[in-house]
Amino acid sequence: MARTLAKRAAYAAIVLLALSMFVFILFFVAPGDPARLIAGEKATPEILDQVRRNLGLDLPMYRQYWNFLTRALSGDFGFSYRNQVPVITLIAARVPATFSLVFGAVFWWLAIGVPLGILSARNPGTWKDRFAQVVSLIGISFPTFVLGMTLLYTLYFQPRQHGFSLFPPGEFVPWTEGFSAWFVHMVLPWFTLALVTAALYQRLTRAQLLDVLGEDYIRTARAKGLTERRVVYKHGMRATLTVLTTQLGADIGYLLGGAIVIEQVFGLQGVGALAVKAVTTQDRPVVIGVVLLGGFFIVTMNLIVDCLHVALEPRLRTA
């Protein structure tokens, strides 16, 4: 088992190294003056000289990459000359909003999608199955920004028009300023993201569980007199969890790099909103930092999923 996990960790490290090479080539080796691209068109010659010294652009290429890699490993993603602060400072200020959004939404979409999928799989062809399928279809049919604007209109704007308030319009309130204020401000973003994603997990759970419940060992378990609940949750869901954790790891890793649409709709100043602003203002060091951070989250979540697979599937422990 330890050998298998070590191999997966080595693969993850190789992927991160390849990502760092890609980012370095894209921003520092591609045609053009990297100092000018990073400092901006209006940068003075003095600033350009300072940027070149900071980046070590007068060094051989392999030395430049090594310096870039070692700084990134230490958490130094460069300096934002447009904001006059280190990139890591900008990202660190945005991470709490993104983490609050993603992990809160994950809880709700699993709490909604997986039980609905189980309900469908246990009652195929019945009204319960059709009900869950309709809920899933509605969730999949709604674009995230449409659902977010609809919730804002019905649960914020309309109540305010009638003189009372149900939910705030958005924005992020750190939980350190009060748990209740943090929670209330995150309800609409959570459910906007969760309702759309729960539809995918309902369908995924239903499809996988139906396949598993048709296996021979499930029929054997039923023939031995096990209750249907025990058959479904102990035997059926154990096999289904492998697929669910794979999808969940990919979703969490992707969203931790910035849930751009949700953050824009609800005014959450998270990593996604920072990335959009950096692209529009051509703040290259921030773009580099967000890309590297997003890649790190994706690779890390996939590594965690691999560890869970090894724990759930004994045959993988000798792979």
Image (cartoon, helix red, strand yellow):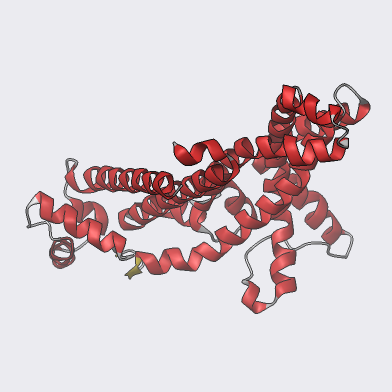
Instruction: Left or right? Give the position of 247 relative to 231.
Output: left
Q: Nearer the viewer, residue 58 or 133?
A: 133
Q: Residue furthest bottom?
A: 177
Q: Position of residue 164 (x, y in %)?
A: 87, 65
Question: Can residue 142 be seen in the rendering of this structure?
Answer: no
Instruction: Left or right? Give the position of 179 relative to 307.
Output: right
Q: Residue furthest front?
A: 224
| Badge count | 0
Q: Position of residue 269 (x, y in %)?
A: 55, 61
Residue 211 picture quarter: top right
For the point 72% across and 38% down, which residue is it? 237
Q: Position of residue 265 (x, y in %)?
A: 63, 51
Q: Nearer the viewer, residue 162 or 32?
A: 32
- Look at the image and tell me in which quarter the C terminus lies: top left
For the point 72% across and 66% down, which residue is it? 183
Q: Nearer the viewer, residue 106 or 286?
A: 106
Question: Can residue 242 be seen in the rendering of this structure?
Answer: yes
Instruction: Left or right? Give the position of 180 relative to 44.
Output: right
On screen, residue 103 above or below 228? below
On screen, residue 304 above or below 135? below
Q: Position of residue 175 (x, y in %)?
A: 64, 72
Residue 188 picture quarter: bottom right
For the point 56% across and 46% down, which residue is it? 311
Instruction: Left or right? Give the position of 165 relative to 310.
Output: right
